[in-house]
């Protein structure tokens, strides 16, 4: 069985633990000034309609008593490492998919898997005082949908024989990777639920969505063949900055690139010296104040400032919105991305 564990309102839960005096109150993290946006908020605040990416002033309008605390990334990273350590004791396969979520696998029948999830959640709560939710299913996608479905502080299982009836009514936006744009394209075609997608052939989806089409064909039927990725081999390295106040102009954003680039260059240089990898691609990531994100990458073995600036400029011009996060990154050609046995391949 596959398990997907996701911490409940992660940054907000850590802060609630650190400040017990705020227990029972609406609390959010982020939004340092009136111009800022919230990173996340607890479930009490969500009952008022407060959401992540919401501007602070708007959140305060709908929830006047909202407590807004600054983001403390270092603390959340430490907690994430502790969660991972607990999971590594209990599962031999652990893939941390982000700071607060993990894919796990264990060979258990459904009833035992459910009992095991209860036990894991209790362990994490007892040791860290942090709540989480777990989805259990025959594959990664369904497990992830499950954890989202049962949140907060809960677990659920989707059994093999329940997959089709579960998928039938599921809105397509519940498929991980289906964002507002894909959703809108489908809405125009009258597709709202996964079962509405079943009438398209794999070829039709491929023609409209490229490689993503084949995945959509499978995912809408609850099929997901992906394995858990436990590899610790780095596939990329990036340096990211979240700005306290969003950056609104292109000129200002390019100055930020000047500032971040030396750190990126230094960390990359160190990594390349210490590891047997070479740069294959460079990329930039921008996250806008409405939490939309865009990435732009090109094939290049060289890293230089002007090239990064050009990428950032192009990415910014895609939407010209205020930027709250900027990342500069490189992807590597690693041992596992090269042919295993090049000599034999040449012979063939
Ligand atoms: P999520 O798991 O998406 O959100 P959450 O843990 O706050 O709430 P939920 O109970 O619904 O899982 O993200 C984990 C953390 O990542 C979250 O606490 C704050 C941070 N985060 C961002 O920095 N940017 C984002 O766009 C989102 C969605 C979250
Ligand atoms: Mg979470």
Image (cartoon, rainbow, N blue to C red):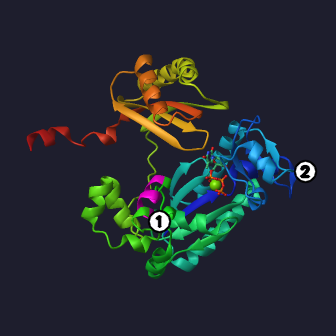
For the C terminus, the quadrant is top left
Indicate left or right for 4 with 331 as reference: right
Q: What span is colored magenta in the figure? A: 181-187
Indicate left or right for 306 with 199 as reference: right
Q: Is residue 93 visible?
A: yes
Q: Position of residue 1 (x, y in %)?
A: 48, 70
Residue placed most toward the observer, 292 or 148 = 292
Residue on which the image places disc 2: 21
Look at 85% across and 55% down and name the residue there.
25
Q: Position of residue 234 (x, y in %)?
A: 44, 38
Quarter of the image where one finds residue 4: bottom right
Q: Is mark 2 within 8 Å of ligand 1?
A: no
Q: Residue 226: say if magenta.
A: no
Indicate left or right for 325 with 278 as reference: right
Q: Is mark 1 within 8 Å of ligand 1?
A: no
Disc count in the image? 2
Indicate left or right for 261 with 44 as reference: left
Toward the left, the furthest residue is 347
Residue on which the image places disc 1: 172
Look at 40% across and 21% down and name the residue there.
307
Look at 69% across and 51% down and name the residue there.
10
* Within-10-Å neighbours for mark 2: few <14, some 14–19, many 20+: few
Q: Secondary structure at mark 1?
A: helix
Using the image, determine if residue 157 lies above or below residue 280: below
Lower position in the chain sequence, tag 1 or tag 2: 2
Which secondary structure dominates the residues rendered in magenta? Answer: helix
Using the image, determine if residue 324 lies above or below residue 201: above
């Amino acid at each position: 069985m596959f398990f997907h564990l996701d911490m409940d309102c992660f940054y907000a839960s850590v802060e609630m633990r650190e400040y017990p005096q705020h227990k029972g109150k609406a609390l959010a993290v982020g939004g340092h000034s009136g111009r800022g946006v919230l990173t996340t908020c607890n479930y009490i605040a969500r009952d008022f309609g407060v959401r992540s990416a919401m501007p602070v002033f708007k959140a305060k309008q709908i929830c006047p008593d909202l407590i807004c605390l600054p983001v403390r990334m270092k603390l959340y990273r430490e907690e994430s490492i502790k969660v991972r350590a607990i999971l590594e004791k209990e599962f031999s396969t652990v893939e941390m998919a982000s700071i607060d979520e993990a894919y796990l696998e264990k060979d258990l029948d459904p009833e035992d898997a459910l009992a095991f999830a209860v036990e894991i959640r209790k362990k994490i709560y007892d040791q860290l005082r942090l709540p989480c939710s777990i989805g259990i299913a025959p594959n990664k996608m369904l497990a992830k949908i499950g954890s989202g479905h049962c949140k907060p502080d809960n677990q659920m299982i989707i059994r093999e024989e329940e997959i089709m009836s579960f998928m039938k009514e599921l809105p397509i936006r519940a498929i991980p990777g289906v964002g507002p744009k894909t959703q809108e394209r489908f809405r125009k075609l009258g597709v709202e639920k996964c079962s509405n997608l079943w009438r398209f052939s794999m070829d039709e989806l491929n023609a409209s969505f490229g490689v993503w089409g084949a995945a959509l064909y499978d995912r809408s039927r609850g099929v997901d063949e992906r394995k858990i990725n436990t590899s610790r081999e780095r596939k990329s390295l990036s340096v990211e900055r979240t700005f306290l106040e969003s950056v609104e102009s292109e000129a200002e954003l390019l100055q930020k690139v000047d500032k971040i680039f030396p750190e990126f260059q230094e960390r990359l240089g160190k990594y390349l010296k210490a590891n047997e990898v070479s740069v294959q691609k460079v990329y930039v990531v921008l996250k806008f104040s409405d939490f939309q994100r865009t990435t732009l990458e090109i094939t290049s073995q060289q890293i230089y400032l002007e090239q990064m600036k050009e990428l950032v400029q192009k990415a910014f011009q895609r939407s010209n919105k205020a930027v709250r996060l900027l990342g500069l990154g490189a992807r590597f050609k690693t041992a596992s991305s090269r042919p295993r046995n090049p000599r034999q391949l040449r012979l063939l």
